[in-house]
Amino acid sequence: MRLAIPVAAGALLLTGCSSDDGGSTIKIAYQGPLSGQNVGLGENMERGIQLAINEANASGDYDFELEYFAADDQGSETEATTAAQSAIDDSDVVAVIGPAFSGPTNVSGPLYGQAGLAAVTPSATNPTLTEQDFGTFLRAVPNDNAQGAAMADFLSGQDGVDSVMVIDDVTPYGEGLADVAEADLTEAGVDIRRESVPQDTVDYSNAARTVVESGVDALVYAGYYEALAPFTTRLNEAGFDGIGISGDGSNDDELINLAGDAAEGWYLTCPCTNAAEEEGTQEFAERYQEEFDQAPGTYSAESYDIANMIIEQIAELGGDPSREDLYNALAGVEYQGLTKTFSFDENGEFTNDAIFMYQVEDGVIGYLGATEELIG
Amino acid sequence: MSLSDIWDVLVLGVVLGSLYAVIAIGYTLVYGVLQLLNFAHSEVFMSGGFGGVIALTIVEPVADPSGLQSVGYVLLGICAGAVLGGAVAFGLEKAAYQPLRRRNAPRLVFLITAIGASFFLYNLAGKLFGRYPIKMPTMYENKKLFEVLGAPVSVTQFIIVLAGVLMLVTVDIVVNRTKMGSGIRAVAQDPEVASLMGVDIDKVVSRTFVLGGLMGGVAGFLFGTNLQVEYTMGFLPGITAFAAAVLGGIGNVRGAMLGGLTLGVVESFTVEIWGDAWRYVGAFAVLVLVLMFRPTGLLGERVGRTA
């Protein structure tokens, strides 16, 4: 009982605070991993958003003040509810960028829907997310279907690729990606062999032998870098000389740390651009470098674009929009960002499915550009 | 499958099987002496991998080592793996099992303690060394060394099989021909009579753990050389090697070797015929089949009665 009074008083004070300055401040939230295992991925996006907000405030173009609101879900499904609720409970939050990962999105999506609060994800790529009708969910990144299709397009456009082996790592991500690549390659008239090599396989020698013995011209690996690294080592030793291609799960410098020379020449697809190399984002990359003393990472530029898109819509709605109005405006948006054009179909799915190519060259993951341009 | 395919797959199976066999000895020795399923042996194996990485990281192998340097690096890695594996096994016995033995704890308590120790050790390794996999420093160029009936054998594969055979022979000699071995066998056969005859049971048990730990540690290093080192690396090879020990007849040293090799070869052919996703389905189907007809395993006797 003795606790009840200070607690009640504190609660009153808190609610008092948020309703007092509700008119003047507008908050944009970000839900993603800001602590825990994958904090590096989360912070890449967070910094992009912070940069956009800082620049908008400093520009003097707007007659409202923006504030950043962090909702840390640790990238985990169990923390997702609390994180989403914290953003929903703050009445100044008008839109959320995120959630960052597919798992937490699955949990948080319905909550944002009930609250009428727009949730624009910069990175959750599981195709089923937009099929569930969360209400206010918008995906601003091509999903895994697009990535599989891009792999297929790229390979079928290469000279001398008549047969391809598609290997998944028996995870939901890997199997989904492999299914799409397999279907699209079959459609393109390429001879396909499908194999599954679980990601915790104790010895990749047998799998490497299967690939080499089959005599395929190219190999699609749908899985993460941690398994691809030893696999490429074995493939190298077994004498595989075909084209190797994998997805954003492998697009990480750790791949090279673990595989060394064996990863040389591997192609990697990603829905993300390389901000430091793309012409449209070079200036952004410099400003980012200046502000945070490091280069932008995966999805930094995309998050920056999404934040600016939201800010623009807030301004167009007169600077003090309701959550519903802002969601409706975003759902019908056509926004030209630095990385690409953002617009959504009736399910909230991204209408742009540009996928970008990388290749491991001289021990670094080099950027090749958009798949469409490479195929010509 | 052509004849040359069969040889290729057999070589891969023997390499994997040698690793399983060396790990399985750790399970079998401890079971033979204490009737204890030491599930924390997976983590003894894992620590051997980290031992190798640590030693080689300190030494920093030169970029293009000569043959002699390469041999030195490999020997160093093997020793470091063995030392850390042995030390962890010794510590495990002293900290987790000896107090229970002193209090005559029931079997089930030992089993739960083993599982608990396993969780503790691999999470500790995750804390100490990080959750990212680590690549073993390059000790030599892993090229094709020679062919066996047309099947290529790489340097790593040769080292694994050679080290495996040497260790298995050593353990067999130690258990069957030395004084320490007769102590182990005596305790395995009848601990009470052995202690009446002046055998120090605690000492014998400790030595048994250390012997198994040395083997497990070396296997961890060799395994890390073949793949990569990670705090979770112990689980799958550990559980498979445990199955190998049961397949051969748990408690029987030669049975562990035979069981390990059998499982490795069966796995390799399963993968060749049905694909990697069927690896354990095939291997464990064989395990169940064998145990249906020979419930005590292929060789089915305990350490105490092999001599």
Image (cartoon, coloured by chain):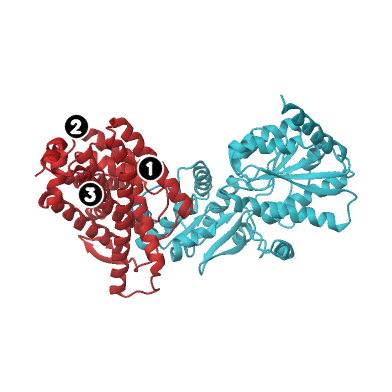
Chain colours: A cyan, B red
Chain of the residue under the numbered disc 2 shown in the image: B
Whether residue A122 is visible to the viewer of this picture, yes or no, is yes
Real-space Cα separation, disc 2 to disc 3, in angstroms: 29 Å
Q: In which quarter of the image is residue A217?
A: bottom left
Depth order, front residue of B112/A362: B112
Relative to B232, residue B159 above or below? below
Q: Is residue A360 left or right of residue A93?
A: left
Q: Which of A56 and B142 is in front in this view?
A: A56
Query: In the displayed structure, would residue B184 be above or below residue A244?
Result: above
Q: In this view, does A111 lie to the left or right of A61?
A: left
**Mark closest to the chain's N terminus, 2 or 3:** 3
The residue to which callout 1 is attached is B118
Q: Which secondary structure, mark 1?
A: helix
The mark closer to the camera, 2 or 1, is: 1
Q: In this view, does B260 lie above or below B64?
A: above
Callout 2 amino acid: Pro
Give the residue at the far left of this rendering: B307
- The residue drawn where x is 65% and y is 49% is A353
Q: Which residue is label 3 attached to? A: B207
The local secondary structure at tag 3 comes to: helix
What is the secondary structure assignment of the residue under circle 2? loop
Gap between marks 1 and 3 measured at Cα: 20 Å
Q: In this view, does A38 lie to the left or right of A195?
A: right
| Rendered image: mark on residue B109 | none
Amino acid carrying label 1: it is Ser
Please, what is the three-letter code of the amino acid marked with disc 3? Arg
Chain ID, mark 3: B
